[in-house]
Amino acid sequence: MTVGHHTRGRPPARSAGRLPRAVLAAGLLAVLLGTGACGAGDSAVDRGTAASDDKAVASGAERDGPAAARPAAGATSEAAPDTAVAVHVIRTATLDVEVTSVPEAVAAARATAESAGGLVSEETTERLDGTHETSHLVLRVPQERYEGVLDELAGSGKLLTRTSAAKDVTGQVVDVESRIATQRASVARVRELMDKAGRLSDVVALEGELSSRQADLESLLAQQASLKDRTSLATITLELSEPYADGADPGDEDTGFLDALGGGWDAFVTTLRWITVAIGATAPFLAAVAVLLVLGRLLRRRLPRRRTQDRPPAPGAQAPPAP
């Protein structure tokens, strides 16, 4: 009986031991599920926050336009060297304008150039036929105001001709700058050698070399200054003229027979006038020469007769018969 009692009492003890284990396993599973859900929730929140931040940045970039991307571009340019080269262009133009009053047009052109920050480098004004004036102006204006000044000058009167040209000298400018840097380094090396030279002959030779290289450097600097002047200031040549009263230039009229006859007669009269003037100017000299020639001939005729009469007769010669 005792053995049977113990045998029947063991199964309940085992079930009582299994119950806490199941509870612990269920609790652990719940904790794991809760942790995973929290992690997934946090990840979702992080992804949502990042997406919202990206949307905010995109909307800010759309509002600011290209300016929003400039900081990043600036950071990139700081990391990489800037290899961009400025473009240097020489601009020239020629205008031929017909105006009602040349002096007024010249004053207006000068004011236009000076207001644009330029100057009038050359001016020549002359009067034709006593009634018409023409003027030749050379204006120097900054490159950024070149187009505006050109249009303003072209609209100051009746535009007859307009030509413009642009020459890219970027390569020449870069070459001159590079040669200047090399020449300066060469001059500095020669000066260092002069400081270290101990013999007089070496010093004299280095002085000659220094003078030659310094002259080359000054020539390059002059070229650089000339290029800078021509690329910073554009050149505009302005020709101003006044119209004729009848609206036509007399020089453009066709030449007829009467015009040719009148021109020939004028030339003939002018030629005769110059011949008369020449004769009048040389007449005193011609008269003096003529008098000298006459006197010379008279003297030549009388001298042989006197010599013949004064000569004694030769011995044995017969005397000439008496008349």
Image (cartoon, helix red, strand yellow):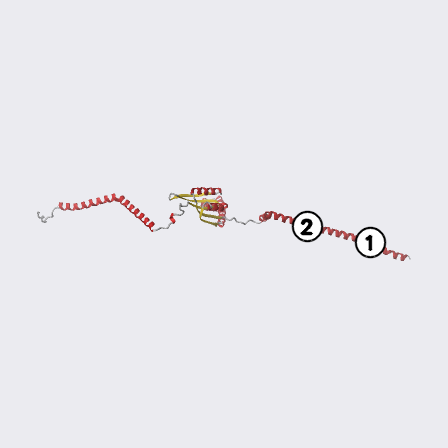
- Which residue is label 2 attached to? 48
* Amino acid found under the numbered disc labelled 2: Gly
Q: Residue at x 82, y 53 (%)?
A: 19
Which quadrant of the figure has residue 310? top left
The kind of secondary structure element at disc 1 is helix
Q: CA distance from mark 1 to mark 2?
A: 43 Å
Q: Is residue 203 visible?
A: no
Give how far across and how far down residue 28 sits, in percent. Answer: 77, 52
Q: Residue at x 68, y 50 (%)?
A: 48
Q: Residue at x 78, y 53 (%)?
A: 26
Q: Nearer the viewer, residue 28 or 200?
A: 28
- Which residue is label 1 attached to? 19
Give how far across and how far down residue 211 sits, in percent. Answer: 45, 45
Identify the mark nearer the N-term, 1 or 2: 1
The kind of secondary structure element at disc 2 is helix
* Amino acid found under the numbered disc labelled 1: Leu
